Image (spheres, grey):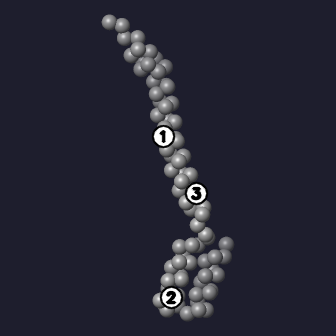
Amino acid sequence: MNHTYWNDWYFGWGWFLWFGVVFLIFSSVGNWGYTYSAHRKYGRPLGGEAVEILNQRYARGEINRDEYQRLKQEILSP
């Protein structure tokens, strides 16, 4: 029985082809995940979540106007 297909693809250089295909799949998925998360963060304003919390505290009356403005300026300053 002649097993040239098995020998050519798995014991010769064929494993290199399959390794390359698997590597490309994993790298593509990893690149997509990285760019997706980076683009989600890029659209957010600087200190956006902190400003939202500060707005909620000011709306509940936990802080006064002067303290609100001072904290907001600290959050948004680079």
User: Counting residues from the N terminus, which is met first, the one under dot 2 or under dot 3?
Assistant: 3
Tell me: 70 left or right of 58.
right
Task: Identify the residue at image location x=51%, y=50%.
Answer: 33
Quadrant placement of the C terminus: bottom right
Question: Residue 42: x percent and y percent?
Answer: 60, 61
Outermost right residue: 78
Neighbours of disc 1 within 10 Å: few (<14), some (14-19), many (20+): few
Question: Residue 17: x percent and y percent?
Answer: 49, 25
Q: Which residue is mark 1?
A: 26
Quadrant placement of the N terminus: top left
Tell me: 28 left or right of 46.
left
Is 69 located above or below residue 29 in the figure? below
Neighbours of disc 2 within 10 Å: few (<14), some (14-19), many (20+): few
Residue 43, picture quadrant: bottom right
Task: Identify the residue at image location x=58%, y=72%.
Answer: 47
Secondary element at image label 2: helix
Q: Amino acid at mark 3?
A: His
Q: Which residue is mark 3?
A: 39
Q: Marks 1 and 2, Cα distance to the nearest angstrom?
A: 47 Å
Is 6 located above or below residue 32 in the figure? above
Outermost left residue: 1
Front one among 74 and 29 = 29
Q: Which mark is residue 59?
A: 2
User: Counting residues from the N terminus, which is met first, the one under dot 3 or under dot 1?
Assistant: 1
Residue 77, picture quadrant: bottom right
